[in-house]
Image (tube, helix red, strand yellow):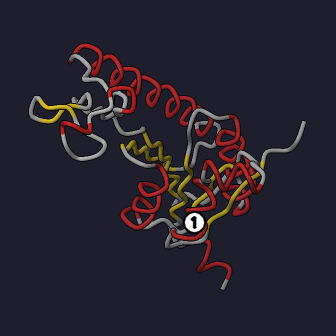
């Protein structure tokens, strides 16, 4: 029975980002999950590195005006109260600024995935695939699990407490509840 399991291809997905926690999770996965089959993983194992770029910022061109008229808090122009008008809702960036933000995001993705891929080269008999996607990390990672047919998802944890997790949200908590495969959350040791 163990021989059959060793012959099956395992698709192990590791979510990486620029944090030390994700790099620790990758190293832990390489040392403990892939090496558990002996000599750095079976030749049929595939490690899928997933990096999710944040979506480009979307700013409204509205500045509190609609069709050239100011919004009125109380419905009519006679009810206009200038100091209580909503502040500007955003700015419209030029194409150069938007392109610069996008280039930075792409360069960061390249840097993170290159660093992760370099760590994986220490294990010569693993197939490594790198996937970069754009969107909300929680949703994208869960979608990639299904799309890529991952057998397990390995992620790092920032170790936020209950309140921070509730306020900021936790990608690993969300994936643990919603991914269609087992999720292994690796906590970084406290130093």
**Image height check: is 73 above or below 107?**
below
Q: Residue at x 63, y 53 (%)?
A: 155
Q: Residue at x 65, y 42 (%)?
A: 22
**Quadrant location of residue 16?**
top right
**Image height check: is 5 above or below 134?**
below
In-image side of 82 versus 78 (left or right): right
Q: Residue at x 50, y 34 (%)?
A: 113
User: Horizontal and vertical percent for residue 69?
Assistant: 14, 32
**Image height check: is 69 above or below 16?**
above
**Quadrant location of residue 81?**
top left
Front-most of residues 53 and 67: 67
Q: Residue at x 15, y 36 (%)?
A: 66
Residue under circle 1? 152
User: Horizontal and vertical percent for residue 44?
Assistant: 51, 61
Residue farthest to the top, as pictured: 96
In-image side of 45 versus 99 (left or right): right
Q: Check the picture and name the quadrant holding the C terminus.
A: top right
Dot 1: element: strand
Front-most of residues 177 and 2: 177
């Amino acid at each position: 029975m163990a021989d059959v399991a060793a012959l099956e291809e395992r698709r192990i997905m590791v979510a990486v980002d620029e944090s030390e926690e994700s790099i620790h999770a990758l190293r832990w996965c390489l040392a403990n999950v892939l090496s558990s089959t002996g000599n750095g993983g079976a030749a049929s194992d595939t490690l899928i590195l997933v990096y999710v770029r944040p979506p480009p910022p979307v700013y409204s061109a509205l500045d509190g005006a609609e069709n050239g008229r100011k919004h009125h808090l109380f419905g009519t122009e006679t009810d206009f109260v200038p100091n209580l008008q909503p502040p500007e809702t955003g700015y419209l960036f030029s194409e150069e600024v938007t392109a610069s933000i996008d280039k930075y995001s792409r360069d960061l993705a390249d840097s993170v995935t290159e660093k992760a891929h370099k760590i994986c080269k220490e294990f010569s008999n693993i197939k490594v695939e790198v996937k970069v996607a754009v969107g909300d990390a929680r949703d994208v990672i869960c979608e990639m699990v299904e799309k890529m047919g991952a057998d397990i998802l390995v992620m790092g944890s920032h170790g936020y407490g209950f309140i921070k997790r509730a306020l900021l949200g936790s990608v690993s908590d969300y994936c643990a509840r919603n991914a269609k495969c087992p999720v292994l959350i690796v906590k970084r040791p406290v130093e």
